[in-house]
Amino acid sequence: MSQYASNLGGSSGGSGSNASVGVTGAPAPTSATEIGYVNGSGNLAAVSPSNPLPVTLQSEVGTLNVNVSQYGGAATSLGQKASSSSQPVVIASDQSTLAVSASSLPLPAGASTAALQTTGNSSLASILANQTNGTQVVSATQGTTPWIVSGTVTSSKNTNGQVTNSSSVGTTPITFTPPTNAVGFVVEAESSNTVNLRYACGTTASSTAGMLLEPGRDSGYIPSSATVTVCAVSGSGQAASIQWVMSS
């Protein structure tokens, strides 16, 4: 397509007298199609690849520049960033469940770790220090760390146990002295009693102090070889019996 420039005269502000002339000054043929724009001098300027049609945006349109390397006026780049350097993302309230993949997660409070074995190890050491007969090897697992404890432990047997009875328990404590090799005891308030009894191990019971025993009840096994005292909360003539558990 031939290109022509026009010289607009008269009120259009052009300086020439021809309404349309060719690029060489010759009149434009009537069959030509003319593409151009009015330049700053009032002349019709031809549009070409080297002279494109200028476009002016209205002021209300604003700036149309898009810079994907910046966000909020700050430079952005690829890769993981701290939250202060990242673009905010809001998940929709109706978003379905999102799968999360993590190579490791923090342990909850109180989880079993090597650092929490100190208390258990100390307790085991204390138990072993108080044992005197027999030898056993105990293997256990705390958390994911196996440990083995070896030492002497007591093997309690009642092959030669002893029973002591008393039918004259009153508010004045009576004393049951453990026999040799005693490792524990069971004390019982007879069912025929009319009031409660109290007992104490290694100290003196009273009508208001000590563990309470109702008629027909016993203490359950107590792993102690200390002296046991028993008394009634009131009255007299109550009955108590104690069975000593002996070691082999």
Image: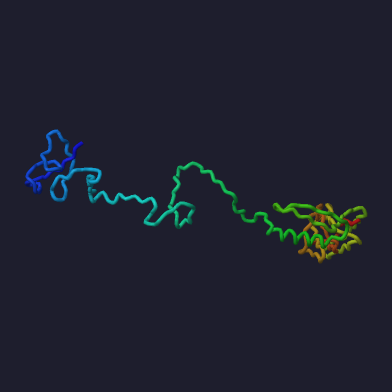
**Residue 221 x/y as whole percent:** 82, 55
Indicate how the structure is coloured in the image. rainbow
> Which one is nearer the viewer's eye here, 155 or 60?
60
Q: In the figure, is residue 31 to the left or right of 161? A: left
Identify the residue shown where x is 19% and y is 37%.
Answer: 2
> Which one is nearer the viewer's eye here, 137 or 235?
137
Furthest residue toward front: 24
> Which one is nearer the viewer's eye here, 94 or 146?
146
| Quarter containing the N terminus | top left
Furthest residue toward top: 31
Identify the residue shown where x is 83% and y is 58%.
Answer: 151
Q: Using the rendered image of the protein, determine whether residue 240 is visible from the camera's viewpoint.
A: no
> Which one is nearer the viewer's eye here, 235 or 122?
122
| Quarter containing the C terminus | bottom right
**From what the image shows, is residue 105 above or below residue 26?**
below
Q: Using the rendered image of the protein, determine whether residue 125 is visible from the camera's viewpoint.
A: yes
The image quadrant of residue 239 is bottom right
**Residue 194 x/y as whole percent:** 81, 55
Furthest residue toward right: 160
**Residue 136 x/y as whole percent:** 84, 54
Identify the residue shown where x is 14% and y is 50%.
Answer: 41
**Residue 240 x/y as whole percent:** 85, 57
Q: In the figure, is residue 143 to the left or right of 150? A: left
Q: How many marks?
A: 0
Q: In the figure, is residue 100 to the left or right of 246? A: left
